[in-house]
Amino acid sequence: QVQLVESGGGLVQPGGSLRLSCASSGMLFSIYAMGWYRQAPGKQRELVATITSDGNTNYADSVKGRFTISRDNAKNTAYLQMNSLKSEDTAVYYCNAGRRRAEYWGQGTQVTVSS
């Protein structure tokens, strides 16, 4: 059974940093593309960043230069380093794993940016 478990969310002041982790189990992590998505209250879920199995990355324009996605295949874990956080980054952040027709989601972790 595939499981994705996010951690690292919390409350942070504007301008602060957080690092989210997505630990996977039950799948061959290294062959999956990994992604981070977020959903703010009253809004649709949106793409934040993705990283392919080869390590190629892609970011939403709103987070370019502030967020960094990475992966550690030895630890079966994906990360999202978030710097210079803004109030508009407040959302539930979800981890996603995808390969061909297979797709899995984590349960989400809350990130709140507020003074």
Image: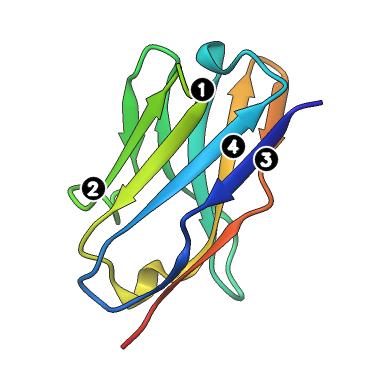
**Amino acid marked by disc 1:** Ala
Q: CA distance from mark 1 to mark 4?
A: 8 Å
**Amino acid marked by disc 3:** Trp
Residue drawn at x 57%, y 48% is: 6
Q: Position of residue 60 (x, y in %)?
A: 35, 47
Q: CA distance from mark 1 to mark 3?
A: 12 Å
The residue nearer to you, when weighing 69 against 18, is: 18
**Residue highlighted by disc 3:** 105
Task: Give whichever of discs 4 and 2 has the lower sequence position.
Answer: 2
**Residue highlighted by disc 4:** 96
Q: CA distance from mark 3 to mark 2?
A: 23 Å
Q: Does the residue at mark 3 contact the one at mark 2 (Cβ under 8 Å)?
A: no
Residue 1's place in the image compared with 47, above or below, is above
**Residue highlighted by disc 1:** 33
The residue nearer to you, when weighing 13 against 96, is: 13
**Residue highlighted by disc 2:** 64
Quadrant of the rendered image containing residue 114:
bottom left
Q: Position of residue 76 (x, y in %)?
A: 52, 24
Q: Is residue 59 left or right of residue 46?
A: left
Q: Position of residue 89 (x, y in %)?
A: 38, 67
Q: Position of residue 19 (x, y in %)?
A: 36, 52
Q: Does the residue at mark 3 contact the one at mark 4 (Cβ under 8 Å)?
A: yes
